[in-house]
Amino acid sequence: MGLGQVAVKTCPEGNGKQFSLNAAMRIGNSWASNDVDRYRRHRPETAMTIVPTLETERLILRPHRLEDFDDYAAIWADPDVVRFITGSPISRENSWSRMLRVAGSWHLMGFGFLAIEEKGTGRLLGEAGFQDMRREFQPSIEGTLETGWALVPSVHGRGYATEAVTAMISWGKAHFPDHRMTCIISPENAASLRVAAKLGFREFARADYHGPILVLAREN
């Protein structure tokens, strides 16, 4: 598989972490027909009940798992990871809230972040994906696919961010073709600005959001 190719998979059913209507109907007697009807009626139209798994040459982008949490918290506690994001390490408690927010985004918005796993080692390297944070600055990017990524410093410079986000962009274009993709980056974050440029993002505004930011967008 080349760097530009993405394989899309769905999570295995029956593992207790993902669920779909089809899976429920295949269970048979364990669900009464009125339960299935109730599920169909109340499921939000925008909900993504099965979070995708994307595969590239070197990476697997997959749903976060409970067993990821210690590594996840360690990533967000790393000062080098958060230098241009929050500016200070994120506590274990707030990392847990962040992980729950990621899961909730898929179910409410139909998109979100995926964990980035290195194929060769199974190591959790970070995350990448889309969000809509209702950020309060102008010009507003509310209603867009705000694109983000964060990886452990030990793999910086190896093209992993570009590879992961390229896969997410391909998925986003297929599932949300009418949504503009945006991102916000600190003007001091030269590495992320280079990645954004490779991915086709171009600056269209500057704003202040807990400090100066560049607001970028790409056209589908």
Image: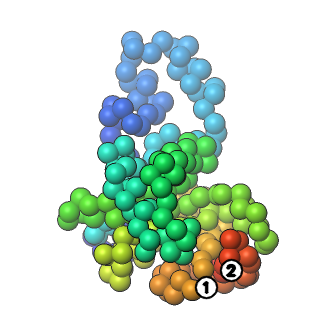
Neighbour tally class for label 2: few under 14, some 14-19, many 20 plus, Cα within 10 Å: some
Residue topped by disc 2: 212
Q: Which corner quadrant holds the N terminus?
A: bottom left
Left or right position of 192 against 3:
right
The single residue placed furthest to the right in the displayed view is 138
Q: Is any atom of residue 101 visible in this view?
A: yes
Q: In this view, does 219 lie above or below 119?
A: below
Residue 60 appears anywhere in the view: no
The label number, if any, that marks residue 63 in the structure image: none
Q: Residue at x 52, y 20 (%)?
A: 36
Q: Are marks 1 and 2 in contact (CB under 8 Å)?
A: yes
- Seen in the picture, residue 43 relative to 184 is either above or below; the reply is above
Question: Number of labelled discs?
Answer: 2
Name the element at disc 1.
loop
On the image, the x and y values in percent for residue 15 come to 32, 34
Colour scheme of the picture = rainbow
Task: Using the rendered view, name the quadrant where residue 26 is placed.
Answer: top left
From this view, report whether residue 35 is shown above or below residue 110: above
Q: Which amino acid does label 2 sit on?
A: Pro
Whole-percent x, y for residue 198 in the image: 49, 84
Find disc 1 in the rendering and name its residue: 187
Q: Distance between the residues labelled 1 and 2?
A: 7 Å
Between residues 89 and 49, which one lies in front from this camera angle?
89
**In front here: 41 or 195?**
195
Q: Residue furthest left?
A: 120
Question: At 40% across and 55% down in the image, what residue appears?
Answer: 73
Q: Which of 3 and 216 is in front in this view?
A: 216
**Residue 32 located left or right of residue 13:** right
- Give the residue type at disc 1: Pro
Residue at the image point whose x is 48% and y is 48% from the top: 93
Q: State the image quarter where residue 41 is shown.
A: top right
| Coordinates of residue 35 in the picture (x, y in percent) | 53, 16
